[in-house]
Image (cartoon, rainbow, N blue to C red):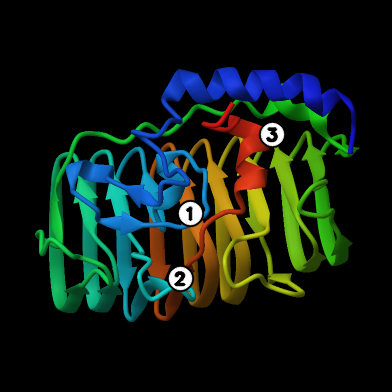
Amino acid sequence: MKSVRNNLLLIAVLFAFSFGCDSQSGVTDNNVDKKGGGSGIQIIRNAVLPQFLTYSVIGGEEVTLNGSPIWLKESFDPELNSDVHSNENVILNGHQITVEGFVTYVNNIIIDGDNISIAPNFNPNSIPHHYQVPSVEIPHINVEDYKSMADIVYDGDKQLSGNLDLGTQSDPLIIYVSGNLYLDNVVFNGYGIILAEKEVDVVSDVIDSSPDPDHSKLFIITGNKFILNSSSSTLHATVYAKYEININAEHAFIEGSLASLSKNTLNGNGIDLRFKLLYSGLSELIFGSSDN
């Protein structure tokens, strides 16, 4: 929506090269992602994404699923795995935890509880459902670098609520908040990116008025923590947090994915995460494209 974006796409392209957004580490239109050293673990069609955005839950530090029940499933594609990865340890603790994908980790996996299932939807080579891998690069995003791309800038803390009109696939809206961001009963229309320098706190629902079955239409990026702490909430978004992600809810429905450079914790008694890939056009605005 601003001509300055064309210039800043160069930054995104350089950023992409700095952490390896290419046909080896990411997902490309060749359809096959060989993440974790496996062969054909994940088939993702028509997506150009850095590798870390191809997991339902990923953390640079510990990833913890704690509670009962917790489901990590695909949204619509029966061949899409809802994969989980940690660059340290994965902890599955509770009763009735279901991961319909692979679980990978650099150090170890700790399973404590009963009715804990790790069962990928797509596993043509019958490889183990959880196993040790090298670390996955998760980028350090400096939110301030993208302020000049924003269509709307809010100085200081900001609460968004009610109907929120975003942009189109070809021209998404970018919102920038220099302080903390509070999302309270938001219904958004269209495609967009929300960047916040400080914490993002989901007070209540963040809902897409017309969800696309193939991809997530909202990319939330925080330079600090992402927190969802409520008795019942719905979140339709792909989330990146420079620090930890903390989902603490009695009932939460999440459609998208959660990526943290630090800890990633899902704690509750009824968390349902339906993995949906981010629309590649939103990713390209931040990270560039492997086609460039």
Does 58 appear above or below 205? above
Res 87 → quadrant:
top left
Task: Specify the label residue 273 is tagged with.
Answer: 2
State whether residue 157 appears in this view. no
Q: Quadrant of the C terminus?
A: top right
Residue 140 relative to residue 32: left or right: right
Mark 3 surroundings within 10 Å by alpha-carbon count, few (fewer than 14), some (14 through 19), many (20 or more) = many
Q: CA distance from mark 2 to mark 1?
A: 9 Å
Image position of 65 (left or right of 104)? right
Element assignment for label 2: strand
Circles 2, 1 touching at the beta carbon (< 8 Å): yes
Q: Is residue 221 visible?
A: yes
Secondary structure type for disc 1: strand
Name the residue rendered at 65%, 50% in the picture. Answer: 219
Of labels 2 and 1, earlier in sequence is: 1
Q: Looking at the image, how many numbered discs can be counted on the residues?
A: 3
Q: Earlier in the sequence, mark 3 or mark 1?
A: 3
Q: CA distance from mark 3 to mark 1?
A: 18 Å
Give, as a three-letter code, the residue at label 1.
Answer: Leu
Which is more toward the observer, 118 or 241?
Answer: 118
Query: Residue 258, which numbered label?
Result: 1
- The answer to whether 6 appears left or right of 206 in the picture is right
Residue displayed at 69% across by 34% down: 197
Q: Mark 3 belongs to which amino acid?
A: Glu
Q: Are marks 2 and 3 in contact (CB under 8 Å)?
A: no
User: Three-letter amino acid code at disc 2?
Assistant: Leu
Q: Position of residue 68 (x, y in %)?
A: 32, 79
Disc 3 element: loop
Q: Which residue is mark 3?
A: 197
Is residue 71 shown above or below 165?
below
Proximity of marks 3 and 1: CB atoms separated by less than 8 Å:
no
Rendered location of residue 191, percent (x, y)? 76, 56
